[in-house]
Structure formats: structure tokens, C-alpha cells
Amino acid sequence: DAGVIQSPRHEVTEMGQEVTLRCKPISGHNSLFWYRQTMMRGLELLIYFNNNVPIDDSGMPEDRFSAKMPNASFSTLKIQPSEPRDSAVYFCASSPPGQIIAKNIQYFGAGTRLSVL
Amino acid sequence: AQKVTQAQTEISVVEKEDVTLDCVYETRDTTYYLFWYKQPPSGELVFLIRRNSFDEQNEISGRYSWNFQKSTSSFNFTITASQVVDSAVYFCALKSGVSQGNLIFGKGTKLSVKP
């Protein structure tokens, strides 16, 4: 079975440009998570969806960041306008349905390395 | 507050040595779940183990073993007879309560295994 698929793997852009990161979760999974990894802050949650509905977006840094999940098999994370401090690795993860949400294992994609010049 | 602390930033060992990676967590919930993930140099995050707060039995999987001690709020990971392929960053993570969806990660421990 295919795992979580993220695209692109690498993105280099200039400050002020719009950036869109894409994620395809594992088929049958109903929760999707976006994390950001930086040297300073480590791995931190940006937003997560359950059944395509945003549940917790408290980690979204500011209005420049937005995320959507139009259907169960696709999600986007958009940064507009991008800034150099957005440079990081962005991970998407998905988890299967389960009665106890906290118990569910998250499976991660390979990440998108974003560099904003 | 919920928090995961991995005090060891970097560890370097020689192949075949045993190595233990420490993880200390904080939570006020009585139900919680602990996880370990591996991030090899290629960058992806690979799930290794999940443990719930009601199961204090140690677990062994090949050369890997995990020691969960509620009394000290620790969930340590030991690699026996380490190999070069074990070189990676290892993350301990917590989900606290039954309804928390997201993982709270420690800062990770970078393990270097030299031949």
C-alpha cells in the first residue's frame, strides 16, 4: 500500500511568492495532520483535520498560512506571501479511524523541504 | 501542561555497543499514549512503537527494547548491539487524554553509530 504522499519534495521560492504544499493521505485514514520541523522549534503541529473538518488550527502561525482538505484523499497547505522564516520541512501525516483518537498511530510522509530566499 | 523532554541532544557510539535514549514526559492525564519515531538521514519519520499509560510491561522487538516507568514518567529506548543503520534522530512523543489527536514531540536525540 502507498504511504502518505507529499509533493513537492523540495521547493525553493522567493520571498513574497505563494507556496502550495500537497498531501495525499493513506487510503481509509480519516485524520490528517500538518507539522513543521525547524531546528529552533523542533516538530510542531500546524493544523489537523478529522473527516475533512479542521479540528485544531491553533498552531497555524498567522493569516499567511491556510490549509484545506476538500476531500478525504487530498489536502493543501498554502503560504501567501512566503517569508524567509517559513523555511522548514513540512510534514503531512495521517491516521486511521478509531474510537480512541489519542490511540491512533500517525504515519508520516517524506516531507517537503521549503526554502524561502 | 504536556511536555516531552529528551535531554540527550546527540549520542555517538561505536558499532555493537548498547545505547539508551532517554525520554521524560509530563502530563496530568491518567490516560495517555507514548510513541517513538525514527528519522533517518533521508528525512522521513518512521513509527517504531506505541505504549499506553495502563501497560507498563517492557517491550522488546529484535534489538530494540523500551522501558516504561510511570513512577519516573520515563519511556526509555534501548538499542542493543547498535549498527550503522541505526544512525538517525529518534523522537519521543506524547498524546495526552483520549481525545487528543496531535503528537507532542520531544526535541529528538541524534544517534551516530560509527563502524
Image (cartoon, coloured by chain):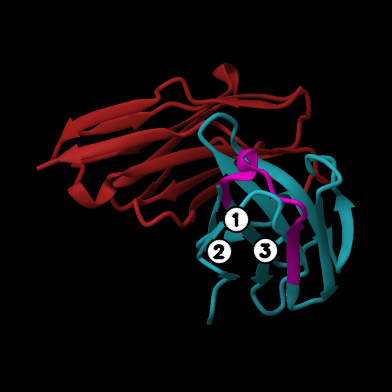
Chain colours: A cyan, B red
**Residue A85 against residue B4 in the figure, above or below:** below
Q: Please, which residue is most extreme toward the left here?
A: B115
Residue occupied by mark 1 = A91
Which chain is mark 3 on?
A
Which chain is mark 2 on?
A
Which region of the structure is painted magenta? Answer: A75-89
Q: Are marks 1 and 3 in contact (CB under 8 Å)?
A: no
Mark 2 surroundings: few (<14), some (14-19) or many (≥20) residues within 10 A: many
SS for callout 1: strand
Residue occupied by mark 2 = A109
Gap in Å between the C-alphas at discs 1 and 3?
Answer: 10 Å
Gap in Å between the C-alphas at discs 2 and 1?
Answer: 6 Å
Which chain is mark 1 on?
A
Q: Are marks 2 and 1 in contact (CB under 8 Å)?
A: yes
Give the camera-side residue of B89 and A39: A39
Mark 1 surroundings: few (<14), some (14-19) or many (≥20) residues within 10 A: many
Give the camera-side residue of A40 and A115: A115
- Mark linked to residue A94: 3
Q: Do marks 2 and 3 both belong to one polypeptide chain? A: yes
Q: In the figure, residue A17 lies in which quadrant?
A: bottom right
Tell me which residue sits at (77%, 23%) in the image. B28
Tell me which residue sits at (86%, 46%) in the image. A63
Residue A105 drawn at (x, y percent): 63, 57
Mark 3 surroundings: few (<14), some (14-19) or many (≥20) residues within 10 A: many
User: Does the image show residue A27?
Assistant: yes
Query: Quick one: quadrant of the N terminus of chain B?
Result: top right
**Residue type, label 1:** Phe
